[in-house]
Image (cartoon, coloured by chain):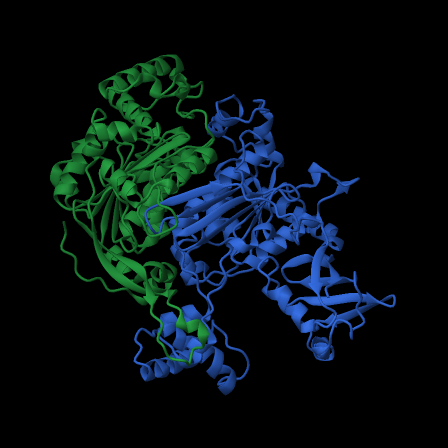
Chain colours: A blue, B green
Amino acid sequence: VLFFSSREKKRRRIEDLTEKMAVDSGHRDGGCDWDGRWNHVKKFLERPGPFTHPDFEPSTESLQFLLETCKILVIGAGGLGCELLKNLALSGFRLIHVVDMDTIDPSNLNRQFLFRPNDVGRPKADVAADFINSRVPGCKVVPYPFIEFHIIVCGLDSIIARRWMNGMLISLLSYEDGVLDPSSIIPLIDGGTEGFKGNARVILPGMTACIDCTLELYPPQINFPMCTIASMPRLPEHCIEYARILQWPKEKPFGGTLDGDNPEHIQWVFERSKERAAEFNITGVTYRLTQGVVKRIIPAVASTNAVIAAACATEVFKIATSAYIPLNNYMVFNDVDGLYTYTFEAERKENCSACSQVPQDLQFPPSAKLQEVLEYLTENASLQMKSPAITTTLEGKNKTLYLQSVKSIEERTRPNLCKTLKELGLSDGQELAVADITTPQTVLFKLNFTA
Amino acid sequence: MIEKEDPVISEEEAAQYDRQIRLWGLDAQKRLRGSRVLLAGLGGLGAEVAKNLILAGVKGLTLLDHEQVSEESCRAQFLVPVTAQGQNRAKASLERAQNLNPMVEVHADPDRIEDKPDDFFLQFDAVCLTGCSRDLMIRVDQLCSKHKIKVFCGDVYGYYGYMFCNLGQAHNYVEEKPKVVKPSGESNDGPEAKKAKVDPNETTMVKKTASFCTLKEALEVDWTSEKAKAGLKRTPVDYFLLQVLLKFRTDKGRDPDPQSFPEDSQLLRQIRDDVLESLSLNSDLLSDDFIRPSLRETLLTATSSSSTVVKAMAWWTTLDQTERVRLRRFTGKLQFVLSDYLWQRLFCSFSFFSFFFYSWIHFAPKSDTRTAGCFLVFYIC
């Protein structure tokens, strides 16, 4: 994997940066701690209590570990990320790295409170790091890519990204004689929010349910049936999707693909949607709605993020100190309708494509077309791949059966989709290697021919 | 209560509040934009509530706190600068609070809430009380109910916390319900369309009214009645713990403190006995475990949060509709409002600072039925 080979370079680069950041507060040796600064944390770590872990031994070492050694990676400096950074910095964590590729937008300001209006346009990771570093003496938040971390806590905005992170941590696991080496486990604490709903979960890769084990829990994206869009619209959203899916590709008003961030594009879709809505006497098409549908905007508010981030930060604290029993392992929260929350233990899937280490089974008759295999990979609820690339070994040579992401290869391999598995030279028991954006490691499938 | 003009949302506001407008609608944002809220108590909990309200874009937020910034305040609360020790807590929190959102009018008031006359409260649309005594809360709650001002109370005691809301005897709100689409009978859509289905994207707004009981009623349930006795088994012990903690605060003027462990734990036990006796309940309802070496940190026993939650959840789903309705009546019809009304939403998602996890007494399964509990209680273990 590419990033490992440049790890050394990156590590040196990060260390240089950390040096620079330490200089301005001038308190690398912890001299910035005033008397009693960490008394509240000491209450948890330097004495026993009724909820502490049975194996917990009170000592001053836990706090030292938090303050001096424990490295945390926060992925995402958005709604959850800002809250997480605040909570972690105030809980004693001082070595925090934050990753975010995004820049600040005015619509972020209703909840991403580390940012101000004159930060708009700047990278989120940088601004978040600056804010915390100047607000919390002794805290060193370093923006962007990662090296070695003890714990990873995520506030990501996509399932694909989560699956990627999940797969990455699983690939870091090491096994000795088939037994998992616990020191290779990097706990992953994952939080997600959407409007008034949210969830927080603790994943110990290789030990507890991973993201892919519970893939079916994520609701599918709302896609209106084509027949409704094409001939029987009832909602303003149907009209907008009509303009987006059918009219835009046909008319290509500005050439190229529809860009949700381009106001002219949205305006065009908005106007076409209004026309269509007028035809069917549908009201409610607005510019804002058009934007929301095209950009798949998810509503968001500060309070849900605050709740979920609080739960996640608590779990980071518990796991880092081993002082309390961690969440086991999935909490859901919903305050749309009253206030509802529920915690359960998500179970590992025996044949999980990400963490089970069991080769995945593909059952097809030899007369099945490659197209059918492709559809299975994308449509199966437990796999939900996005654009899988399928390769195999034939006559000792690596052969690409189908790959979508590179145009020239896609064109070359497209005819294979119509060929049967037998025609492609595949045999019973053949191993197919599938690569996809949802997993950093190739997934191996074993082809089992059915009658 | 102030007369509200219909506030207009500026373009800047529309951009900043875009994501939450998509959640609760422009009307709701306008109502928020015209509302004045009082927040009493700027401890850790108060700071989080202040943050969420200010970010949400209320018209005005008054921070009321007579306490001084202590060394502890700086740890628990991110609005107060380290250098502010000795200053008034509300005033010290003002600058950072205001910076969260310049569009909100944030005021700091250093007075004691007990000294405020009745008409002080009448200038607000909603009142949120943290760190207040039982009597004060009851007084404010009674006063505000009469004047249709929404009341929210809450506190955090180490691992444990609670929240209460009273939105009035006749709280009107609107609920978004999915529309059932009847089969059109036309052949265009194919065989799928012939089935009547619920399109989750098609909704209709239904007007409703909910009735809330007062804090006094919620705290003064008569446990000797038949109905109450029947419900006792299903009432989490947290409710009685809250009664003990409120009484401690009234008697001592402060919360239990590990610094005074011997006398405080003695007093807590005594209060426990007194409270349960006065309610005609068995004193072993709340075992001695609730007082442990770390007072103020740990106040609940035994079961882990998840198992309690699971048990309680399992119990709730076994009830049929009538039982649930009865249970709701029993707890005084204290219902969290649905959908559109902002207040409940904002306050109910109290984000409890750092170390808190939560449990709760009654909840609705994943359907459109309401929660019955008036109290949200929680603990972390």
Q: Relative to A77, is B360 above or below? A: above
Give the number of marks: 0
Residue B353 image point, x, y percent: 41, 38
- Residues B342 and A416: in front is A416
Q: Quadrant of the C terminus of chain A?
A: bottom right
Q: Is residue B113 left or right of residue B273?
A: left
- Residues A136 and B243: in front is B243
Picture quarter containing residue A183?
top right
Answer yes or no: is residue A244 visible.
yes
Q: Relative to A293, is B258 above or below? A: above
Residue B354 image point, x, y percent: 45, 38
Q: Residue at x 43, y 58 (%)?
A: A108
Q: Is residue B182 left or right of residue A328?
A: left
Answer yes or no: is residue A265 visible.
no
Residue placed furthest toward the right: A396
- Residues A321 and B82: in front is A321
Q: Quadrant of the N terminus of chain A?
A: bottom right
Residue placed furthest toward the bottom: A251
Residue A280 image point, x, y percent: 33, 81
Q: Is residue B344 left or right of residue A293?
A: left
- Residues B316 and A297: in front is B316
Residue A338 image point, x, y percent: 32, 47
